Each structure stands twice: as C-alpha cells, then as structure tokens.
Image (cartoon, rainbow, N blue to C red):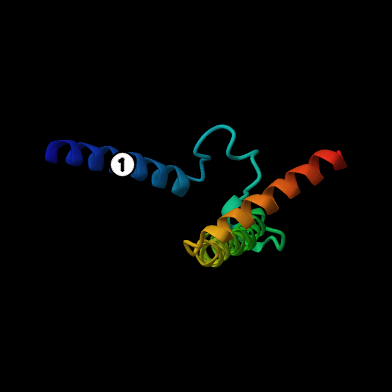
Amino acid sequence: MFHGLIFTYRCHFAVTSLRLQRRQAGEPEDGLAARRPQFNGLQHARRVAVNGQRIGMGLVGYASRLAWWVDRAIDWIYDGAAVGVTLRLTGGVKRAHSGNYSAYVLWCLVGTVVVIVILLGS
C-alpha cells in the first residue's frame, strides 16, 4: 500500500509540474482552454440569491416539523385518548355487572327492546 501511495504522489507531482510549466510558458492546458470562458460554478452558486439547495433544505425542515406534530397527534389519539376512553368504559361495565340477577334480567329486556326497535325502524 505504501508503494502505491508513493506512485500516486509521483504521478500527481509530474502532472502538476507539467501544468505549471505550461502556464508559465503561456500555453493553454488543452486546446479548448483558450476558447472556453472561465466559469467557477461553485463560486457562482454561492453568490446566487435563489439557491435550490437552500430552498429544498428549508422545505424539508418545515415538512419534518409538520410530520413530527402529526406524529405527536396520532400518538396522543392512540396512546392517550383511546386508552382513557377504554378505561372509563371498562369502569362503567364493571359497575353495571354487579352480580345482581335482577340487573342481568333488566339488561336482557333492554337489549331485546333495542333490537325490536332497530328491526321495526328499518
């Protein structure tokens, strides 16, 4: 691996020194360099007021905050509200089933009346 690093360094040094010699002689690095306009895209992107990456990252930031709040709301519904309603209904059912047989007969009669009203109503 060490020999590979030395070879890479030597090749880079040779290419860099060749480019430096051509620049000092006033020659273009390739045939197209003299006709090509000088443009540094990275510096241009930093100067441009409307930068797509900044806009995109801003939108992603707002979308992530919105998704976090939606997630918190869903967690509250399933972990808080649903559990609370279930506990309250369970307490009501426990109080209704007290072990008294007259209460069970009354529940059966009320259920029968509800079924008859539903069947006659439709």
Q: Nearer the viewer, residue 66 or 45?
A: 66
Q: Is residue 13 above or below residue 86?
A: above
- State left or right for residue 56 relative to residue 24: right
Label 1 environment density (alpha carbons within 10 Å; few <14, some 14–19, many ≥20)? few
Q: What amino acid is found at the position of numbered circle 1 in the picture? A: His
Q: Quadrant of the C terminus?
A: top right
For label 1, the residue is 12
Q: Name the residue at 34% across, 45% down.
A: 17
Q: Name the residue at 24% across, 43% down.
A: 9
- State left or right for residue 35 relative to residue 1: right
Task: State the image coordinates of residue 109 (x, y, percent, origin top left).
Answer: 67, 51
Q: Residue furthest right?
A: 121
Task: State the image coordinates of residue 119 (x, y, percent, origin top left).
Answer: 80, 39
Q: Residue furthest left?
A: 2
Task: Tally the marks.
Answer: 1
Q: Name the residue at 62% across, 60% down.
A: 70
Task: State the image coordinates of residue 107 (x, y, percent, origin top left).
Answer: 62, 55
- Residue 115: in sight, yes or no? yes
Q: Nearer the viewer, residue 109 or 73?
A: 109
Q: Callout 1: helix, strand or loop?
A: helix
- Residue 40: in sight, yes or no? no
Task: State the image coordinates of residue 82 (x, y, percent, origin top left).
Answer: 56, 60
For residue 102, which quarter of the picture?
bottom right
Q: Nearer the viewer, residue 108 or 91?
A: 108
